[in-house]
Image (cartoon, grey):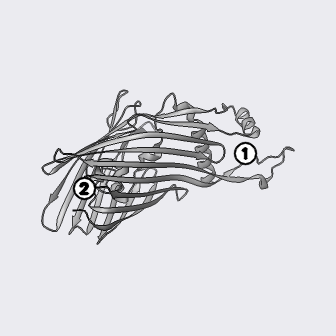
Amino acid sequence: MKRKILSSAIVCLIFGAEVFAQAPKYSNEFLSIGVGARALGMSNSYVSSVNDVTSGYWNPAGLANIGNQFQVALMHSEYFAGIAKYDYGGVATRLDSSSVLGVSLVRFGVDGIPNTTDLINANGEVDYNRITTFSAVDFAFLLSYAKTMKIPGLRLGGSAKIIRRRVGDFAGAWGFGIDAGLQYDHKKWKFAVMARDLTSTFNAWTFNLSDQMKQTFIATGNDIPSNSVEITLPKLLLGSSRKFDFTKKISLLAELNADLTFDGKRNVLIKSKAVCVDPHLGLEAGYMNIVFLRAGIGNYQQYTDAYGKSIQTFQPNVGVGVKIKSVYVDYAFTNIGNKSVALYSHVFSLKVDINKKHK
């Protein structure tokens, strides 16, 4: 039953893509979830402190901090009781003493969705043998480059991304966008600016509907979707972090981020028609640079319940990580819902340094 309800929602959202061309809010939102259990455990507060292969997603400038010749990372998580699966893979390689190249792949999808559009045959009879299945899948491929500048502490980076979205054989889209970011170290502080979808990202949708499906749309009072363009407007991510070394063995990393959107009023802490600001804070306590405990808070929202009472909610995340020589194993426990609807997910990620450190 959950899968059927979710499949109906997915089809309605995807087939409504032409609406987003006029009001492009929440477009390509699968790329707003985040990658890597370390970042997710810190509530996505990671744009200034990120210094590994996942920088291709969070802030490509961070790739310049990779200390090894190669670095590989993998992540898997599941949402909605395992119905939706979210996966990430990335690899980065140092080109020379000042530049690094990275490649990332993100997949978010629901598989095995029942297709009941042909459930009733030409005689008006229900025929369960006519039920087939399909997948609703979103892919993103990112090619990233970072360079350490001659200005001390300054790193610049950029990512070109290709988007592929499919809803079975019914609909599909190709998209392209560009991200750009910088990091700057000043004494013990780190600052970062990340411009996501800098030039706006355009998804060109095409639809392939059978006559039966078109009749279903008409019979249910819905418009038949037509080829259209979905636009993802730019988003600006600001971040600042600092690491405190209390002893030779104990440390604490703290990072504060603010996500700025310009696509209309959203349900965030600071909102207006011109710009909305979504702040989030992450902490990471380390012991001997081997064991790490993480926590974060973000996704502040306010809504009105059935009794007209205003309720404020936020999303707490926690996580843990272990470093064994050149292998990093991380775990995060997240909740993408609120206090009334708990949608908890377990996120696991693996990162490996390969070859000797770059000198």
Distance between mark 1 and mark 2 Cα atoms: 57 Å
Which residue carries the number 2 mark? Answer: 97
Q: Residues within 10 Å of mark 1 (few under 14, many from 20)?
A: some
Residue 23 picture location, percent across and down: 49, 29
Which residue carries the number 1 mark? Answer: 117
Q: Which residue in the rendered view is the most extreme toward the bottom?
A: 324
Kindly identify the amino acid type of the residue bearing the numbered disc 2: Ser
The structure residue drawn at horizontal position 76% and vertical position 46%, both measured from the top left corner, is: 118
Q: Nearer the viewer, residue 174 or 320?
A: 174
Q: Is residue 202 left or right of residue 329?
A: right
Kindly identify the amino acid type of the residue bearing the numbered disc 1: Thr
Q: Evaluate whether residue 83 shows in this view.
A: yes
Q: Which residue in the rendered view is the most extreme toward the front?
A: 96
Q: Nearer the viewer, residue 85 or 188?
A: 188
Quadrant in the picture for residue 287: bottom left
Q: Which mark sits nearer the N-terminus, 1 or 2?
A: 2
Q: Evaluate whether residue 305 shows in this view.
A: no
Residue 14 higher or lower than 331, as above or below: above
Q: Is residue 257 left or right of residue 57?
A: left
Q: Quadrant of the C terminus?
A: bottom left
Q: Nearer the viewer, residue 130 or 3?
A: 130
The structure residue drawn at horizontal position 41% and vertical position 39%, both measured from the top left corner, is: 303
Residue 56 picture location, percent across and down: 36, 50
Q: Is residue 106 left or right of residue 250?
A: right
Residue 151 picture location, percent across and down: 17, 44
Residue 253 picture location, percent across and down: 22, 56
Q: Is residue 329 left or right of residue 97?
A: right
The structure residue drawn at horizontal position 33% and vertical position 52%, both measured from the top left corner, is: 55
